[in-house]
Each structure stands twice: as C-alpha cells, then as structure tokens.
Amino acid sequence: MGFPGTWMTESESVVYRVVPKCACSTIGQIMYYSDHGKFFDGDIHDSKTGLHKWSQEASAPLIEANVQAHKSYAFTCVRNPYTRILSSFFDKICGIQRNGKRYRGNLVPTLMQKYGVEVGDPETNFEFDQIKSFRRFLLFTRDTIRWRRPIEPDIHWSAMSGHISTYIVNGGTYDHIFWTEDFNTGMQVVLDNIETPVKVDLSKVPRFNESEGHGPKRAHPVEDYFDDLSMHLVYEIYKRDFRLFKYDFENPANKMPTGEIDLDEVHAKLGD
C-alpha cells in the first residue's frame, strides 16, 4: 500500500499527506518554495520535478524510508466537512476542469440522468437551482461511499479520515494536523518546527486556489444547502471527520472547529 497522496520536499525538511480540497495547492507551493525560492509555474499537482510525490517512481522509496523512520516533521490539513463537500460539488461537478472538459468524462451526464443533478454551463452563466442539485449530489456521494456505486468514491469527496488513516496504518506518524479555516496559524507551526533551505514568510504567500473561476459561484450561505435530510447524509458519510477534527455537526453555518485536535486520539482511532 505504501504512502499514497504523500509529498515531501527534496531537502526532506518536511512530509505532507495531501487531503483533497484542504488547501493542498497552497501547501504544495509553500513546500516547493521552501526548497527553491520560487513557486512552481502552474498547478503544483502537475509538477513532475522539484517536489517528491509518492506517485513519482523515483520519489516513492525516498518517501517510504523517511516516513517509516520518522526522519522528518510530518503534517496534514483538514477542513469542515460541510464546506469541503460543497467545494467538491462546485469545483468537480459544476466546474470546467483545467483541460477544458468536465471532470471524469461521463460522470456529469450520469449524475444528470440518474440523480437529476443540474450543473449549468458557462454559456448561461451557470444558472441552475444550486440547492436542489447539491442535495441530489449528496445522495450520489452517499451511494458511492456506502455501496461503491454507480462509481467508486472519489478522492475529492471521500472522508478526510480515510485519506489520513492510510499514512498511519502503513507506519507513519503525524506531528501536526491543522485546520484550513485557521491556515496561517497552523502552517506557521509547521514552519517553526522545520529547517528549510529558503525561509518562508506566510504573510507574502498568495492563496493558490486552482479551482477558482472554472465554475459557478456559490449563490447562498453554506447553511442554506443543508436541510435536515442533507445534514443526516453528511453525518452518515463524515461522522469520523466531525468527531476527530472537532467540527460542529449541529450548525452548518459554523465552519470553525469547536475544540483542539487530539493527535493521540487520531493515531489510535485511524491506526486500526
């Protein structure tokens, strides 16, 4: 199994377990900059050099050796499950991807046909009933995660705890897990604990939101998308995420965490 979704700086100053839709573009760019003194020109997910990634053949044995010996500071970043699933919907389902096409080819037509999801299109300025379509998308999300149909669960909406657990189960240990909602504070803790070839000033780092501008803007407050049934579905899918990372299930309007993440609890619960 190894360490899927794990990135490491070439200097081996730090190791990061990627969790999709949780500031991973910005984190990857900070890691790249901390080695090279410049940001990667393009989407950091497309980089083939300058940053070790588990998916790169030459990088995998270096990452494995580092992680199993816990040679470097290791961290990851999480996000409120309500805003994360909304972001996945607007980016991956409604948005046009970097290649100019819809995400995963026939996925959107399948959603339209089987679940009645509408996504709008650029020609009509993406006008559609966002709330109704999102709630139908939630049913699809639940079906992929619970029954693995009509497709396998996608990394962008599968639970954060699932991503984070693979690192622990295969022998990794986290030194820090922080929240996207308090990004600078959390990322500064990482930078304070590592030695990098190039110093990083977080106040000067731009936000790299690679999904921005490719689809419709969210037209309503977060809480408007979640009625009682939607909240039930979200809790069914992301129960461990709410509990472990201390997010407020009862109030979708509150994106901030309600307590501190207990690393010992995370390692115990996700290491089985």
Image: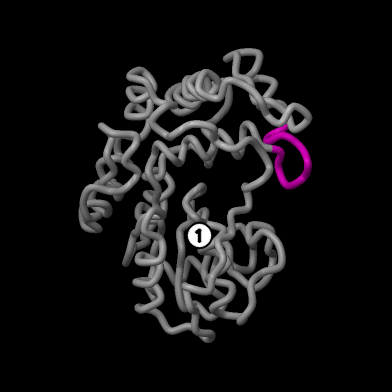
Residue 51: image quadrant is: bottom right
Q: Amino acid at mark 1?
A: Thr
Q: Secondary structure at mark 1?
A: strand
Which residue lies at the image location 66% right of the left edge and 38% below the top edge? 215
Residue 231: image quadrant is: top left
Q: Is residue 204 above or below residue 147?
A: below
Q: Specify whether residue 117 is in view.
A: yes
Residue 128: image quadrant is: top right
Q: Is residue 56 above or below residue 118?
A: below
Q: Is residue 102 magenta?
A: yes
In the image shown, does 55 or 180 lie closer to the viewer?
180
Residue tagged 1 = 6
Which residue lies at the image location 42% right of the left edge and 34% below the top edge? 222
The magenta segment: 96-105
Which residue lies at the image location 35% right of the left edge and 44% below the top edge? 255
Query: What sort of colour scheme is used for the picture?
Result: one colour
CA neighbours of label 1 inside 10 A, class few (<14), some (14 to 19), many (20+): many
Q: Specify whether residue 69 is in view.
A: no
* Residue 229 pos. (x, y %): 36, 18
Q: Is residue 251 left or right of residue 208?
A: left
Q: Is residue 94 magenta?
A: no
In the image shown, does 96 or 103 lie closer to the viewer?
96
Q: Is residue 244 left or right of residue 118?
A: left
Which residue lies at the image location 45% right of the left edge and 28% below the top edge? 145
* Residue 53 pos. (x, y %): 58, 63
* Residue 84 pos. (x, y %): 45, 41
